[in-house]
Image (tube, helix red, strand yellow):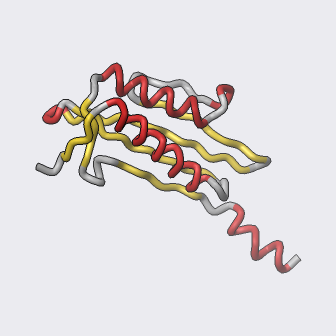
Amino acid sequence: MKYLLLALPLAIVSCAGSHSTIRDGYAFQMTKSQAANLVKTTMEANIEADRMLPTTELVASGYDRALMDTQTYTLTAVPVPAKGAYGLELNHNGTMFNGPAKATAIFNSAVERASVTGKKVSINN
């Protein structure tokens, strides 16, 4: 019983975080329609169809669930008008132990797809 009480706070601790090309100082030159398609298809490739949430043009969200644990992932294409580019941001939150690892995988997939779609440009200068 004592160990169960010690484990309970760990079980309900939330895992949240974010990844951002904007924060890392770069974006990808592409059209708005290419950015919208990239966000949508990246999430669809990583989240089961019945766990996708309603999306907008440049934002796609979905979640994973295992027993009582849930992790939500949101991928956003952020316009950088001065460069004719879009940065990528992935935010996640929830209680799944592997949530942060999956978030990293989704973000890396989005960056890989973006590098094929458009030219990587620095936004710091």
Q: Quadrant of residue 65?
A: top right
In the rendered structure, the answer to whether residue 10 lies left or right of residue 58 reads right
Residue at 39%, 43% (x, y): give it: 89
> For the point 19% across and 47% down, which residue is it?
122
If the image is split into quadrants, where does the N terminus sit?
bottom right
Q: Nearer the viewer, residue 54 or 58?
A: 58
Tell me the residue at 19%/30% (across/down).
84
The residue that appears at 44% across and 31% down in the rendered structure is: 39
Which residue reaches farthest bottom? 2
Location of residue 50 in the rendering, given as x and y in whole percent from the top left corner? 68, 26
Question: Farthest residue in the right direction?
Answer: 1
Give the number of callouts.
0
Q: Position of residue 4 (x, y in %)?
A: 83, 72
Pick out the residue farthest to the front. Answer: 116
Q: Residue 52 appears at what percent x and percent y? A: 60, 29
**Coordinates of residue 124 in the picture (x, y in percent):** 16, 51
Q: Relative to 3, is 125 above or below?
A: above
Q: Is residue 40 above or below residue 104?
A: above
Residue nearest the observer in this picture, 3 or 60: 60
Splitting the image into 4 quarters, where does residue 7 fall?
A: bottom right
- Horizontal side, residue 119 vs residue 96: left or right: left
Residue furthest top as drawn: 33
Q: Is residue 26 left or right of residue 71?
A: left
